[in-house]
Amino acid sequence: MDIISSRTSNITQLAMDGLMERQRAIGANIANVETPGYQRKEVAFEAQLSEITETEDLKDFLKGQNSIKPKPIKYDDFMQMQEIQGYRRPLTPQEQRYLITNSYGKFDPQVMDDVYSEGTLDGNNVELEREMMDLNKNGTKFVVLSNLEKKYFSGLAEVIRGGATQ
């Protein structure tokens, strides 16, 4: 594990990558507002981020479940296993493989044509007002995430300098 990596930072970086891809799509939409037949583009990535977060939650759960070595169990106690304090089952080979998978590497924002928005007679379905609102909303999200990253790295720098004492 990289010393400057954290789950929050990794997810934030992926979200910022998705927002950058969305920014490109919005820019293309605005540039083609009067291009006959142009279909506006949308970028979907939030569901992928949720899936990655859920995967990492499950990995954390599995690691927590396996953080204490199992106690030896007598045959008579086998049926009461749920009540034995500190019992942890060993990870299955499938769970061990799951723990080392790179869930972050599967992130791939999807650029799609918006086929649901109504278009004009020339087939173009870009609404400039909508694109400007999306541009503003997307930019705000990016600023919030970049401030989160800045705060994370400022805290890390403070720890490295030795200034953060409890």
Image (cartoon, rainbow, N blue to C red):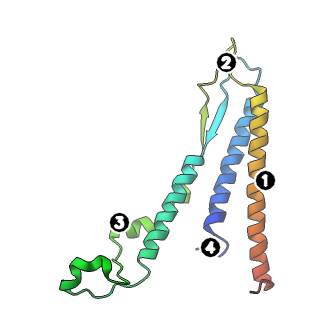
Dot label at residue 34: none
Mark with earlier residue (2, 4): 4
- Element class at badge 1: helix
In the rendered image, the vertical position of residue 95 relative to residue 89, given as above or below: above
Mark with earlier residue (3, 1): 3
Does the CB distance between marks 4 and 1 fall below 8 Å?
A: no
Other residues around mark 1 within 10 Å, as few (<14) / some (14–19) / many (≥20)? few
Circle 1: residue type: Val
The residue shown at (78%, 65%) is 150
Label 3, label 4: how many angstroms apart (C-alpha)? 25 Å
Q: Nearer the viewer, mark 3 or mark 4?
A: 3
Q: Specify the farthest residue to the top.
A: 121
Dot label at residue 94: 3
In the rendered view of the protein, which quadrant contains the C terminus?
Answer: bottom right
Q: Nearer the viewer, mark 2 or mark 3?
A: 2
Image coordinates for residue 87, horizontal then vertical, percent: 35, 81
Q: Nearer the viewer, residue 155 or 123?
A: 155
Dot label at residue 119: 2
Does the CB distance between marks 2 and 1 fall below 8 Å?
A: no
Does the CB distance between marks 3 and 1 fall below 8 Å?
A: no
The residue shown at (69%, 19%) is 124
The residue shown at (66%, 32%) is 41
Circle 4: residue type: Asp
- Residue pointed to by mark 1: 143
Image coordinates for residue 47, horizontal then vertical, percent: 55, 47
In the rendered image, the vertical position of residue 150 relative to residue 45, given as above or below: below
The residue shown at (79%, 41%) is 136
- Residue pointed to by mark 4: 2
- Element class at badge 4: loop
Label 2, label 1: how many angstroms apart (C-alpha)? 32 Å
Label 2, label 3: how many angstroms apart (C-alpha)? 49 Å
